[in-house]
């Protein structure tokens, strides 16, 4: 039986928190309507689809690399590590892995990178949705711990508000020290 896992990441661009990845093997016998690139779906639709994916998929797994890992090995390498962790966490071993983007992590099975794959391949769309919903929940929790940064609003991306709050309050422990806007604040530039 061919088991194709879709893999995608969320959180390469933010200044704070982990990069989160998901791997999903969908069940052909249980189709899920409305799968698409998570960025093209409303938050409400993503939440509903995430629950359906978790219920109907043959298996799914999340992977992550923390801000400290990102600072140690850079965001690209951390993303590859998080993708490896997501695939390794699947309860069934895929026979092939389809990855959103232009490069593949080192995996023990055949893999293929597909630019724009989250809008083309349903298994990658499903991974995109799970990763996005998971990271958004983490940002809501971080917002509770550090309300001054308004993480629930901007999800850690370098928006005008986030940059203003970073300048005003300095960096919190989850800020990525290797990212230029955070470096500038830490160096008092």
Image (cartoon, rainbow, N blue to C red):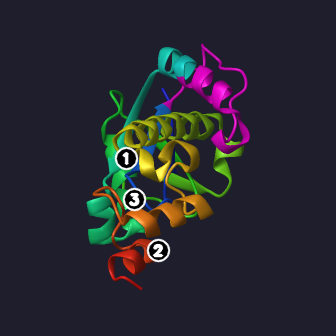
Secondary element type, mark 3: helix
Residue 125, relative to residue 91: is it above or below?
below
Please indicate whether residue 33 sits to the left or right of residue 17 in the image.
Answer: right
Which residue is labeled 2 in the image?
Answer: 181
Q: Which label's residue is closer to the chain start, 2 or 3?
A: 3
State the residue lying farthest toward the front.
168
Q: Nearer the viewer, residue 114 or 108?
A: 114
Q: Position of residue 13 (x, y in %)?
A: 52, 62
Answer yes or no: do the residues labelled 2 and 3 have beta carbons within 8 Å?
no
Which residue is labeled 3 in the image?
Answer: 80
Does residue 110 appear in the picture of this structure? no
What span is colored magenta in the figure? 25-50
Secondary element type, mark 2: helix
Please indicate whether residue 37 sits to the left or right of residue 140 in the image.
Answer: right
Count every numbered label the image shows and give the total. 3
Does residue 145 appear in the picture of this structure? yes
């Amino acid at each position: 039986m061919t088991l194709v896992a879709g893999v995608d990441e969320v959180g390469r661009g933010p200044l704070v928190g982990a990069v989160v990845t998901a791997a999903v093997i969908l069940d052909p016998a249980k189709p899920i309507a409305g799968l698409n690139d998570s960025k093209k779906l409303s938050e409400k639709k993503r939440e509903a689809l995430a629950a359906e994916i978790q219920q109907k998929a043959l298996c799914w797994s999340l992977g992550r690399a923390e801000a400290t890992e990102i600072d140690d090995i850079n965001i690209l390498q951390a993303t590859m590590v998080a993708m490896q962790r997501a695939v390794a966490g699947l309860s069934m071993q895929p026979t092939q892995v389809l990855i959103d983007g232009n490069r593949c992590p080192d995996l023990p099975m055949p893999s293929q990178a597909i630019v724009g794959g989250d809008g083309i391949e349903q298994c990658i769309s499903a991974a995109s949705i799970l990763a996005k919903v998971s990271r958004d929940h983490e940002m809501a929790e971080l917002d509770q711990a550090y309300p001054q940064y308004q993480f629930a609003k901007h999800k850690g991306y370098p928006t005008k508000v986030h940059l203003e709050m970073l300048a005003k309050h300095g960096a919190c422990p989850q800020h990525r020290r290797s990212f230029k806007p955070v470096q500038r604040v830490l160096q008092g530039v």
